Amino acid sequence: MFNWTVRQLKTQLWPLTLLAVTVLLCALTAWLLIWPAYQNPSSRMYTSKLGYATVFRQTGKPFQVKTAIAAERMIESNFLGEGLIQSEPIQVPMIAMAAIKKIHVQEGDPVKKGQRLVELDDERIKLRIEAAHAALQTAKAEFERVRVGSVNILLDERPELDSIQLESAENEARSQKVILEKYNRLLDRGSISNKKWLEQNIKATEADVQFRKLKLSTKFALEGKENSMRIAEATIREAEMAWRHRLAQLADYISYAPADGIVERVLVHEGEYNQDPGRPAMMLASGIWFEANLDQTALGQIEVGNRVEVRLSAYQDRIFGGTVERIKPLVNFSLGGPETNRPIRPLGTGSPEWPATFAVRINLEQTDAMVVPGLTGFARIANQRKNICVPRGTVTATSGNRGIVFVVNEAEDGCEPRDVAVGWTHEGWTEIRDGLKPGEQIIIDGFQVLEPNDRIVCQLIDPPADIATLRAQTKTAPRNSQDTSKGGLEDLTLSNLP
């Protein structure tokens, strides 16, 4: 019987061995693959009807989650934009109409404000200045002649002479009037004839008329001389202004640099004649700055004074520091180069998108002679502000600038989803613009498997900036004695989930 049993076993050895190996492989597969996936929240098996979370939820046990206190911190955002070194083009005009005598600079020369650039022939203007000065001296001499009354055409404007004649006429009229009064008394007594009285009356009347005429003439002479003096003074001022005007024109025969810069182009040559007043003699490139074109989404996100790092294609190993000096809030269709006439996404691959940018002027702090207009590069503008921030990954169901954050409801041992406005994301932190208040407790890990009315147990921690770092720390952390003592499903908490 025993021998028969041994023979049967020998005949069934290979099937039994195959069965044992199969059972062992199935056990290893279940232990190494199925069981970790069963308790992995990111797997479909975990959230299935017979999954780990369902079984855990049926036992009535709370889910353990990681939480943190919502607090304010500094958040930074960087904006990138292409651009190029630019300068202000300045025209240096030639005002006077004259031959070009001397050009003192060439293209590419650096110039300082007030430096002499172009000289015109000033011989003729100097002659005009001498003529204007002679006219001024003539006007002054004419004023003296009017003042003393020696001008022939102004014989009737001598109030001093008329005053003497007026005084004599006044005395004569007074004397004739006294004689006439005596004649009146003699006529009453009959001592003189009527003829004598009439002759005296005529003399007195003529003397009075002469006095009145000289009085009126003296008035006209006085007023006329005052006006003649004003005319002479105005003539002096006019001649003086003409002389000063000629002197000012002499300054236009030399063109100076209106600002520091570099001579970009020289448009004239020595010996040419300037026929057009205001004709540009040369072009200067004044000032150096970097103008970057940023996407329209950055409009309103940056401010004047923000720190900037500029990298130029010609100096890739250098970083030029600077600050935002001016923001041009005009959105145009530019990619940092020529104006575009086609969308950046070709038709057939989705909705066409036109590039929409705006320009930002950046003042460079440290430049040298080799930083010249036309160099291309890009700028990184950093902006900081203080607001409520949560670790990246805490916000779920993000759409546009909105998302969901799970806030702990301590009164009900649960949580509630909260709609929040999402701002910047930087170095593992996401800014919450609206929807959270400082001091509220939020779930930063473990909310992925929660359903409404699930109970939770909070583990308040000081989270790192990145949820991935938090999960890596949780995965490598040993279970505590409280978890291992309970055994069974209570031992399978979220603290051990990857």
Image (cartoon, rainbow, N blue to C red):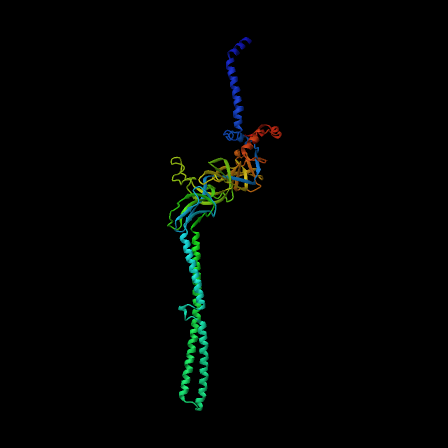
Name the residue at 62% across, 30% down: 482
Name the residue at 46% across, 81% down: 174
Residue 412 can be seen in this image: no
Is 100 positioned to the left or the right of 409 in the image? left
Q: Position of residue 195 (x, y in %)?
A: 40, 87
367 and 112: which is toward the camera: 112
Name the residue at 43% across, 53% down: 250
Residue 38 can be seen in this image: yes
Q: Position of residue 268 (x, y in %)?
A: 39, 45
Where does the N terminus fall, quadrant-wise? top right
Is 119 positioned to the left or the right of 34 in the image? left
Q: Position of residue 201 (x, y in %)?
A: 41, 84
User: Splitting the image into 4 quarters, where does residue 192 fall?
Assistant: bottom left
User: Splitting the image into 4 quarters, where does residue 70 fall?
Assistant: top right
Q: Is residue 114 above or below residue 60?
A: below
446 and 269: which is toward the camera: 269
Where does the C terminus fall, quadrant-wise? top right
Q: Position of residue 42 (x, y in %)?
A: 51, 31
456 and 278: which is toward the camera: 278
User: Splitting the image into 4 quarters, where does residue 495 fall?
Assistant: top right
The total of numbered circles placed on residues is 0
